[in-house]
Amino acid sequence: MATTITDSQKPFSLDPYHVSEEFGFILPAPLMLPRNLAIPYCEVSQRLGLPPILTHADAVLANWRKRDPQGLFDMENLELLVTLPGGDSVRGFFMVTLQVELAAVPAIKSIPLVINGVQRGDAETVTRALEEFSQAIQGMTDALKLMHVYVKPEVFYGIMRIYLSGWKDNSSMPAGLVYEGVQAEPMEYSGGSAAQSSLLHCFDELLGVKHEAMSGAFLTRMRNYMPPSHKRLIQDISLQPSLRGFVQQQACEPLTAAFQLCVTKLLALRSYHINVVSRFITVPAARARQLRNQGNISQEETVSRAPTALEEKGTGGSGIMNFLKTVRDCTRDVFNLK
């Protein structure tokens, strides 16, 4: 049976305000996680090499079990270990994301084949591996489409995002969170985000996608929210000979076509992700603003429950649409092989 985090288990503060000696005026006090939760939470997180906040690895990669141990690894046979408020949409969101991760397995397996082929100068092996790679990315896009089947946008926007958002770059918690008994000063951590999945980081390093400064800094910071072995894998791929340079040097038509198809599929995945974010964040945010402007804030409208501070933010704290479009555009730049 899945464990549910309820409203009564949310962090609390003994004093809602404190006086800032530096600025001389009253600021919101940082919320506090009680020591009986904070100390073991931080100790376990340290052993795992993860920050003490809900991450992609927690909520997706390690948050499932099969109903029938001998059954298929599919939506109907999977359930959550730990869930959040939001009903069936919570299970749908995490399980669809897990299906996207599963679809990427052939792509991850093909990466060593690509690297070894480049090192040996074997264009044929690299071409075959890249063909497998592009098919897997298409599978990821197909899996992502299930989000529209299993998740209600108003529930994701109005309920789930509150629990997925962290206490960094979140104006709802500008003073951060104190982990009582761990550190006196408040700490800031970003909420769970798809950017914490190692998949696209690996793909970008392999294909030579170079991100602009702000987006690149955010993505690099998100690596600190991954299991240490995932972070090392990304680093190892980044140290290998350039696949893009190899494709340019070989000037082999099948190899070039296979490489460009990989970029095309990755670009399509990121474009589709933008569409998903539009439906699950941008459109509900517009509805919430409309309700506020009409003075019609009601708990009957689920989108009204989300704090206004989260309107244009991803759960990781980024300005979501600008970030995703910038990342997509940088992916498109890889097409230029001259």
Image (cartoon, grey):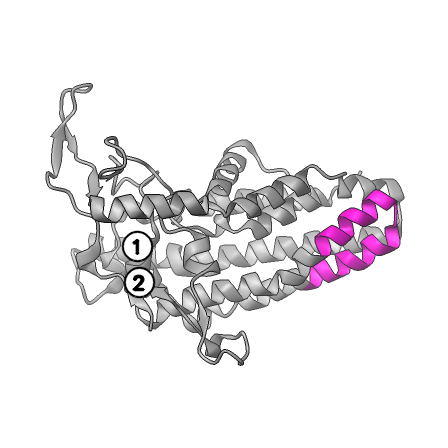
Q: Quadrant of residue 174?
A: top left
Q: Main secondary structure of the magenta part?
A: helix
- Identify which residue, 172 or 227, lies in the foreground: 227
In the image, residue 182 lies at what x, y percent?
27, 37
Where disc 2 sits, the SS reads loop
In the image, residue 308 lies at what x, y percent?
26, 48
In this rendering, would 56 be left or right of 268? Answer: left
Q: Are marks 2 and 1 in contact (CB under 8 Å)?
A: yes
Picture quarter with the C terminus: top right
Q: Give the magenta range.
A: 110-135
Residue 6 got which mark?
none
In this rendering, would 220 be left or right of 312? Answer: right
- Identify which residue, 201 or 306, lies in the foreground: 201
**Residue at numbered disc 2:** 84
Which of disc 1 and disc 2 is earlier in sequence?
Answer: 2
Q: Categorize mark 2 by other alpha carbons within 10 Å: few (<14), some (14-19), many (20+).
A: many
Q: Quadrant of residue 127?
A: bottom right
- Identify which residue, 285 or 98, lies in the foreground: 98
As drawn, 48 above or below 103: above
In this rendering, would 135 be left or right of 322? Answer: right
Q: Is residue 312 visible?
A: no
In the image, residue 214 lies at what x, y percent?
50, 33
At 38% across and 67% down in the image, what residue appears? 81
Picture quarter with the N terminus: bottom left
Residue type at mark 2 is Leu
**Residue at numbered disc 1:** 163
Give the alpha-carbon distance from disc 2 to disc 1, as whole Å.
7 Å
At 53% across and 80% down in the image, what residue appears? 71
- Identify which residue, 43 or 335, lies in the foreground: 43
